[in-house]
Amino acid sequence: MKVVALAGGVGGAKLADGLARLLPPADLTIVVNTADDFTWHGLHISPDLDTVMYTLAGLANPETGWGVVGDAFLALDMLGRYGQETWFHVGDRDLATHVLRSHLLRQGMTLTAVTATLARALGIGATLLPMSNERVETVVETDTGDLSFQEYFVRYAWQPVVRRLRWDGLDVARPAPGVLPALQAAAVVVICPSNPFVSIGPMLALPGVRASLRAARRVLAVSPIVGGRALKGPAAKMMAELGQPVSAVSVAQGYADFLNAFILDRVDSAEVPQVEALGVRPFVTDTIMQDQAGRIRLAQQVLKLAESL
Ligand code: FO1
């Protein structure tokens, strides 16, 4: 059964990891948000691709969900001694990924090819695809001015109030090769529990993606909002600031035109009738992935639900 997962950072990576442990590698394609990508001291960083890659390779730092487990920060310390900005915490091992990616991109490889090369070297069998080979940049328009996504998220710890989100480059970007064919061939598409605005949103906005999801046979999403809060990151705060009700059903509403089933946490079971009213099949379970077993359990439920649709 061919499965495509759409994923952003930490939450998405966990479910993608659960799926990767259940499915034959040839059956799983993970399309990853690249609108958080940015240039750091001349290097191309793709935080979400790296988070998914490290998670699937068993290398992710379990405390943060991003970065490499047991990493040291000697290079960052040295940058600090040169008086450079060090708010973005790149570890020494992680740095190697950014050096190599940047080098290969400069040699003319596409981000798709670079991602495949890095993932293969780390022993990942599933296909990892960036959403696009063209640069798309989330700009967060806030009460303190326009911020790049990493400035908003890391430097200012998502405290500025979001007025609007903008994606520079989206008007000319296309989905990376392989993205639309994977969606068209998929028996199941899984929208991972990632931020619907800044992680899933940019992927849906690429030409042909939303139409492919509408045409897909089974599309399931797992709510990133549990009990009115985001499991990680600013999704709930953004939702409120953008004037939407902060709830799981609010996420389902944004996907309703292509969604067949929506998985929400037990604490949100009161929202089941509202999900049904959208014409979407609700499924209630424990969605919090505490450990590896939790990832596999949720992935199993997603696949079982998909088979029943
Ligand atoms: N997130 C942080 O909150 N602080 C950091 O210093 C940080 C560094 C970092 C370095 C490499 C990398 O691949 C990711 C990193 N992240 C960091 C995570 C990342 O910024 C976010 O998880 C995503 O952009 C949101 O999906």
Image (cartoon, rainbow, N blue to C red):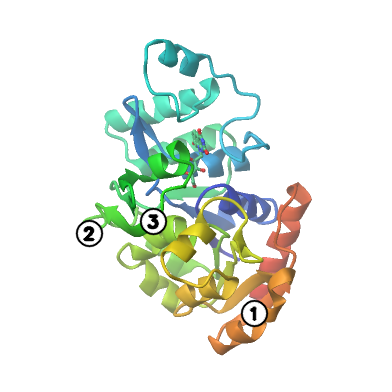
Q: Residue at 71% across / 57% down in the picture?
A: 288
- Circle 1 SS class: helix
Q: What numbered label is drawn on residue 299? A: none
Q: What numbered label is drawn on residue 162? A: 3
Q: Earlier in the sequence, mark 1 or mark 2?
A: 2
Q: CA distance from mark 3 to mark 1?
A: 26 Å
Do we see residue 182 in this rendering?
A: no
Q: Is residue 252 above or below residue 232?
A: below
101 sits to left or right of 193: left
Q: Earlier in the sequence, mark 3 or mark 1?
A: 3
Q: CA distance from mark 3 to mark 2?
A: 22 Å
- Circle 3 SS class: strand
Which residue, as the protein is rendered here, is positioned at the far right? 293
Q: CA distance from mark 1 to mark 2?
A: 35 Å
Q: The residue under label 2 is which amino acid type?
A: Asp
- Could you say where residue 112 lies in the image, as x and y percent from the top left? 38, 44
- Which of discs 3 and 1 lies nearer the camera? The answer is 3
- Could you say where residue 78 lies in the image, as x and y percent from the top left? 45, 11
Q: Which residue is mark 2?
A: 171
Q: The residue under label 3 is which amino acid type?
A: Val
Circle 2 packing at 10 Å, graded few (<14), some (14-19), many (20+), is few
